[in-house]
């Protein structure tokens, strides 16, 4: 059995079965993938009144929980661009001190429901999507955001600038901690 991890927060087993069991395996895989896209944990709610055109552009990653696809990266940014088909092109960039090179991943995000709600699903691996839940947002100026995945393993604090006002940072940390996130494990990103 080979273990794959195509979507953050999801582990997919790819066993070798006879044709007879393939339908059951396919159904199980589909159910598992559906479970990987969902609302935020800890009683948090996604923001409403969301305006993707104001969210477009570059955001700096201020802090994150550790995960393998960003491990060791500094100067991390995410750029969002609305596409004609109402998907959002996502370009994540970060500098690897180990390789002394920039790393880039390009993905696509789709709204999970209405486009004025901050619940999206994002894919960097073909048909596999993970939840992207905007749970706190500077709705007046779109200068900061708190984003979660479908579990307590994924949390990001984003800002339009490489630094974030300390009072706002502490407010976002408090929101995440009250929901149950391990905020003491956050990595503060160097810019």
Image: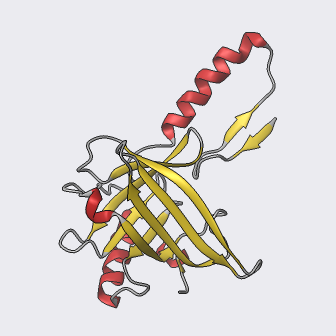
Relative placement, left or right, of 137 versus 85 is left
User: How many numbered marks are there?
Assistant: 0
Point 32% across, 61% down: residue? 135
Q: Nearer the viewer, residue 99 or 144?
A: 99
Percent x, y for residue 69?
64, 62
Horizontal relation, residue 145 to residue 37: left or right: left
Residue at x 41%, y 71% (from the top left corner):
58
x 30%, y 82%: residue: 168
Colour setup of the view: secondary structure
Which image quadrant for residue 42?
Answer: bottom left
Residue 130 to residue 185: above or below:
above
Above/below status of 170 relative to 81: below
- Residue occupying image coordinates x 26% and y 50%: 117
Q: Residue 5, percent across and down?
A: 67, 47
Question: In this orientation, which residue lies closer to the viewer: 96 or 47?
Answer: 96
User: x and y percent of residue 73 in the render?
Assistant: 63, 76
For this orientation, the residue located farthest to the front is 84
């Amino acid at each position: 059995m080979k273990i794959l991890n195509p979507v953050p927060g999801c582990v997919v087993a790819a066993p070798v079965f006879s044709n007879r069991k393939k339908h059951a395996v396919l159904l199980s895989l589909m159910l598992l993938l559906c479970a990987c896209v969902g609302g935020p944990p800890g009683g948090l709610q996604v923001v409403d009144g969301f305006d993707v055109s104001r969210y477009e552009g570059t955001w700096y990653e201020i802090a994150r929980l550790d995960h393998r696809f960003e491990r060791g990266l500094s100067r991390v940014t995410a750029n969002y661009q609305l596409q004609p088909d109402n998907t959002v092109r996502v370009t994540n960039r970060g500098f690897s001190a180990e390789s002394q090179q920039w790393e880039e991943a390009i993905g696509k995000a789709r709204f999970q429901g209405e486009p004025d709600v901050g619940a999206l699903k994002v894919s960097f691996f073909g048909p596999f999507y993970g939840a992207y839940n905007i749970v706190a947002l500077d709705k007046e100026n779109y200068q900061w955001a708190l984003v979660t995945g479908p579990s307590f393993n994924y949390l990001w604090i984003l800002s339009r600038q490489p630094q974030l006002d300390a009072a706002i940072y502490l407010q976002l940390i408090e929101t995440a901690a009250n929901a149950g996130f391990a905020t003491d494990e956050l990595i503060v990103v160097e810019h």
